[in-house]
Amino acid sequence: MTLAEAIAVAAAGFAAGGVNTIVGSGSLITFPTLLAVGYPSVTANVSNTIGLVPGGISGVIGYRREMRGQWRRAGILACGTAAGALLGGILLLTLPESVFDAVVPILILLAAVLMAIKKTPSANADAEHTTAATTASFATGIYGGYFGAAQGIILMSLLRFCLPDDLQRLNALKNVLAGVANAVAAILFIAVADVAWEAVGLIAVGSVIGAQVAAKYGRRVPSEVLRWVVVAVATIVAVVLFAT
């Protein structure tokens, strides 16, 4: 890896840590960057997942005030997330790389579509549907363990339908669950997969700093602006991957 490539990977990690903390989809920045510097798709995904774990922890710390009173809820949903992430990680390691290459752009495009059509939950949704939220966490965990890009967006959208709570508090909960998914998958990948540790280190350092910056200043960015930026980036990445 050249110095310019190392700087690009670290910068992508910084941006991804910030985006993941605010809304999710940071892997849409780091994953294509790793592909661009020459890593195979599965190695890039594995290394990206491991590298973003410290950034996820940093984001949870940054949103610790919004997690007050939610740790029991987080513990229940995290069980579903962890089980799903383990299954998703196994699927990634057992399916042929050609299958992964074919599925990735579809998953990214699906994330863009879900973000574009995301609805606001009904004002009358005053019941907390814990079972539905756990199921959503499990399903998103599978996606997170298999690929992970935009899992925060998907999870946030589903949580808004299941849990009547302030959006910032749900964002904090999303950070915890996405972090659990990445951590579980990372443990599996470290044990059995081919990891590009230089990429992991660069992404880790960048994402930790980016998450702290985002936690401090990111709430000033209008959510609609972030939403459509993510839709645009996801669509561009999907189109590029379809064409390659």
Image (spheres, rainbow, N blue to C red):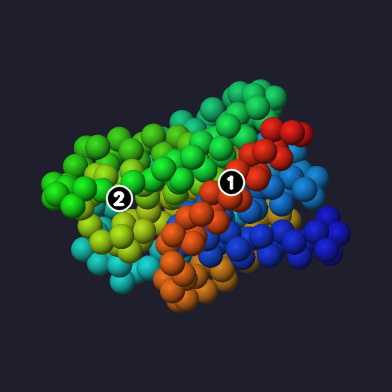
Q: Distance between the residues labelled 1 and 2?
A: 21 Å
**Residue 12 in view in this figure:** yes
Determine whether 32 is above or below 242 in the image.
Answer: below
Please state the horizontal and vertical placement of residue 92, each as a whole percent of the image: 58, 31
Say which residue label 1 marks.
234
* Number of residues whose C-alpha sits closer than 10 Å to that of mark 1, classed few (under 14), some (14–19) or many (20 or more): many
Using the image as rendered, state which of residue 65 and residue 241 is in the foreground.
241
Q: Looking at the image, do the residues carrying marks 1 and 2 touch, with CB atoms under 8 Å apart?
A: no
Q: Position of residue 31 (x, y in %)?
A: 65, 48
Identify the residue at horizontal 76%, vertical 34% (top origin): 244
Q: Where is residue 198 in the image (x, y as percent from the top left)?
A: 73, 56
Q: Identify the residue at horizontal 69%, vertical 33% (top origin).
A: 242
Locate residue 76 relative to residue 199 in the image: left or right.
left
Which residue: 65% across, 27% down? 102
Q: Nearer the viewer, mark 1 or mark 2?
A: 2
Percent coordinates x, y for residue 165 in the rendering: 23, 57
Q: What residue type is labelled 1?
A: Ala
Image quadrant in which you'd find residue 208:
bottom right
Q: In which quarter of the image is the N terminus?
A: bottom right
Residue that numbered label 2 is attached to: 120
- Extreme residue in the bottom direction: 216
Q: Dot 1: what SS?
A: helix
Q: How many labels does the image show?
A: 2
Q: Which residue shows up at 25% across the image and 67% down it? A: 68
Q: Which disc is residue 213 wearing? A: none
Of label 1 and label 2, which has the lower sequence position? 2
In the depicted view, which residue is nearer to us: 111 or 96? 111
Going by the numbered disc 2, the residue's amino acid type is Thr
Above or below 151: residue 170: below
Which residue is outermost to the right? 2
Q: Could you say which is closer to the camera, residue 59 or residue 162?
A: 162
